[in-house]
Each structure stands twice: as C-alpha cells, then as structure tokens.
Image (spheres, helix red, strand yellow):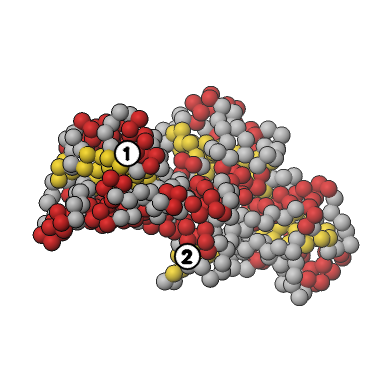
Amino acid sequence: MSNIKAKSALISVFSKEGLDPIVQKMSELGITIYSTGGTEKFIKDLGIDVVPVEEVTSYPSILGGRVKTLHPKVFGGILNRRDHDGDVSQLEEFDIPQIDIVIVDLYPFEKTVASDAAEQDIIEKIDIGGISLIRAGAKNYKDTLCVGTVNDYTKLLQVLEAGHGTTTLEQRKEFAATCFNISSHYDSAIYNYFAGDSETKALKLSEPHVMPLRYGENPHQRGWFYGNFDDMFLKHHGKALSYNNLLDVDAAVNLMSEFENEAPTFGVFKHNNACGVAQRDTIQQAYIDALAGDPVSAFGGVLISNTEIDAATATEIHKLFCEVVIAPSFASDALEILKGKKNRILLELVNGALSRKRDHNQLEVRASLNGYLVQDPNLKTDQKEDLKTATELTPTDKQIEDLLFASKLCKHTKSNTIVLAKNKQLCASGTGQTSRVDALNQAIHKAQSFKFDLNGAVMASDAFFPFPDCVEIADNAGVKAVIQPGGSIKDELSIDYCNKNNITMVFTGTRHFKH
C-alpha cells in the first residue's frame, strides 16, 4: 500500500520537548496511542487517552525499566506486512494490534559520555528497546512510519497535518533513512566508547551533520562538510563557503588556537599556509604588520584575529579583497564596515572554539589508497622549558620569544618548511619544498623582496638539519638564532658552525612535519 491512514501509534521517547502538539493532533485524528513509563505519564498529564503497553503485552515493565517494549505483540504490530496473508492472520490469531507510527527518541548516550559520568551511568544510557523499535519501524517502512529523533517531531507534525493522518510511501522511506542514520551513528558511538584507544580498533566514523558547499576543490567537483559548523561559528555575512574556504579556515583556526589569550595577534592565510602573522599591542597594528608579510598573497585570502576586531581594524581590512574574516567577536560598527563587500564571509568563533580546537583529541583522518590514514593530532606546542641550548651562545629573552613565535608558525606550515621571524612578525616562510635548503632560500628571497631586514631575525625548522648548509645560508642572510628539533647524527656540524659564527641554536626534541 502506498498511502496509509494511521490508526495507531507507539510512543516511547526520552525527550518530550515538542511532543505535546503531536499527541494533541493524534488525538484529534482519532489515532490510538500506546506508550510506556515516563512518556505514558506525560501524555496522560496532557489529558489525552493513552494505552499502556503492559495492557497489550500482559507483561509489566521489568528489571528497573530495562525491558518494556521487547515483546512479540509490540514488534509483531510494527513488523507485520499488510499485503502478506500469513502476517494478517497471525495478528488476528494472537490479538496483536497494528501499529502504524512509531516515535522514539533514544537515551542520550553521547551526551552522557561527554559529561564524564560514571561508567555505570553511561552503560544505562545504552538504549536497547528504543534502538530495536527504530530498526523494526524503519525496516517495515512500507507499512510503518518511524520517527527516531526529537529533531523530526516538527516534521512529523507537518506530515500529520498535511495528510490528515495519512502518510505516503515516499514519506515513510525518507523517515526510515533518517532512522537508520540514527541507529548506525548511535552504535558507532557505543563501539568507540568501548574500544577506547585500542590500537587495533576498527575505524568507525559517523557525522550526522552535513553542509553542502559551493563546490569542491575545483568548480567541477561537488563538495560537502560533515560536521556541526554552527557549533564553531556564527556566520554574520557573505556567500556560501567552498571546500577551499574551509581548508583555509581550518588552517587559520588551528594556528590561531596557539595564540588564544595572548597579546593581539593577526594571521593571513592562503592555501592552508600563513603568509602573514604578527603580534602587537593593538589588533589594528597586528593586522597591518601581518599584511606586510606578504600583501600580494593576501589577496583573496582568509584572515583571522585572536581578539575582537574593532572599527579601526575593519577599516584597514576593508581595503583588501579577502574571502573570509574570522574573529572571536566583531564590534558592531566593524561588522557594518566589513559587510560593505557583499560576498565577504564573516565568521565569529563561538563556544570557546579556539580552546576546543587546540585541546581536542579528535583523530585526524585522511583518505589514502583504498583506505584511510589515521593519526593523533599534533597537540604539542614547543614551550620555553622544552628548549635545550645546543650552542655556546645562549639566546636572549627576546630571542626566545621570537623563537617560540616562529616555532608555532612552523608547526602549522606545510613541510618542508623554514620560518623566518623578527619582533613577533612573520618575515617569510618557505613552504612545501622538497628540500630544506630550497625552503630556506625561498623564505630568504621572499623576505628580501618585501624589504624585510633579516639582521637579528630567527629561523625555525620543522625538522633537523642533516648538514650545516642551512645555518650557513641563514647566517649570511642575517639570522642570529635558530630553533629546530635536533636529532641528526650530524647535529655537531650545525652546532660547530653556529659556535664559530656567534649564532645561538636551541633544540626542542620535537619534530613538526605537516604533509
């Protein structure tokens, strides 16, 4: 049957929010309602007739509510096929009521885990009856409409009102797809909880939120973002985001999370790399000096601040064509200025997004060959206490500040990379080169082309120097302090060069490759 007039419904939900207009509508339509426990009481309190499931099964809720709906009379009423003579006769033989609509909202397992609840509380939030009802109702979508989440209550109400209680096959199949999405996501979350950090666990990824993008990496490719974008950003203005926009936004947020709660810091990003970063006393000056790092590459880039963008900064930004501007907040007059370009995307970081991005332990996943590469995120940030002076000359406090600043930028730049910085300003970086010497030469050439004086600058490398050639080239350009992981069997060659030429060099002990 394609269209089915609903005569009965089973409701067993955790969240009652938004349920009252549904049961009111069902009552108006003459739909018999079956229910259990707290849901049954909620419906009764509304003054609406409801049949306890116990009256159908002749069996009480047992084991503290663990078993309520798991009974042949319930599942027979959901799973029977209306066009199957044997099913119809068995319903009559065993006095099983036909159930046309199933409404379920599962115990909040993920929220309970996230709340750091005790293990027993978490285990009790593994829904058994609810997940079984969802699977049964969705499987039998040809005859049953199944709603598996509070998020679909409004949609169900619209269906009931529009069809006066009649549902179509297309509607039931659409609800069924949502239900199986819910059940598979729920089971993935439970598996990941039990598997923990086991190195041999299967890869179970499930993200129910999806946002279509303007296009993929190129206009002929489709693109989507799977994740709760609104949990990180409030979009104030601008066109729809593209795949490349989000890659740059992610790179910008990753780096700026290193500077949360520090002095005003501004970054300019292009193709996932910072082309300008500066830390200053005001965000306006930080922007001006970040832009000076590479005003050419900044065209069409993504901009990010670690503090509120004011009107003075917005006025400067407005002179530049840029795709996206990100900040923890925008002054109201700054927003109006930046909205002057209709396509410019303005994103406000919400819910402590920088902290959560820095501190999260979400695995990094990348498609590779016929499978996936998975790794822990690089949550290590080089600190002053990590530094081991490898040379006779010890860095000054000011040099240490610049070295750590450069190290943060280096960590978030494509390998092989070299970062040159001075006075907490990115002078230039060599990005994604096949040799470290090429990366250094690229950085020096770029810095000099934008008239940076590298005398007294510092250099950061994402990996060790196998030969002394890089420190020699850097020395000739004016660099006087170096930060690198160390660990090469030929470290002494670089150390010897530095000692002979009054250069200070510190080892961090941590490599920061980024491919």
The answer, for residue 230, to whether it is visible in the render is yes
User: According to the image, label 1 marks what residue?
Assistant: 153
Seen as rendered, the residue at the extreme bottom is 489
Q: Along the polypeptide, which appears first: circle 2 or circle 1?
A: 1
Residue at x 71% of width, y 57% of height: 460
Residue 180: x %, y % from top left: 33, 55
Instruction: Between residue 25 and residue 359, name the one nearer to us.
Output: 25
Residue 113: x %, y % from top left: 53, 50
Nearer to us of marks 2 and 1 is 1
Instruction: Report the quarter where the C terminus lies.
Output: bottom right
Vertical position of residue 462 compared to residue 207: above or below: below
Please give left or right for residue 7 compared with residue 129 in the image. Answer: left
Instruction: Between residue 124 and residue 103, name the one nearer to us.
Output: 124
Residue at x 15% of width, y 56% of height: 93
Instruction: Between residue 215 and residue 49, name the one nearer to us.
Output: 49
Please give left or right for residue 408 compared with residue 414 in the image. Answer: right
- Element at badge 1? helix
* Disc 2: CA contacts within 10 A as few (<14), some (14-19) or many (>=20): few
Please give left or right for residue 2 compared with residue 79 in the image. Answer: left
Residue 155: x %, y % from top left: 28, 39
Seen as rendered, the residue at the extreme right is 392
Task: Give, as a three-letter code, the residue at label 2.
Answer: Leu
Q: Identify the mark at residue 203; answer none if there is no mark.
A: 2
* Disc 1: CA contacts within 10 A as few (<14), some (14-19) or many (>=20): many
Residue at x 78% of width, y 57% of height: 386
Instruction: Between residue 429 and residue 454, name the one nearer to us.
Output: 429
Vertical position of residue 348 compared to residue 197: above or below: above
Residue at x 89% of width, y 62% of height: 392
Residue 143: x %, y % from top left: 18, 52
Task: Give, as a three-letter code, the residue at label 1.
Answer: Tyr
Tell me where residue 30 sits by quadrant: top left
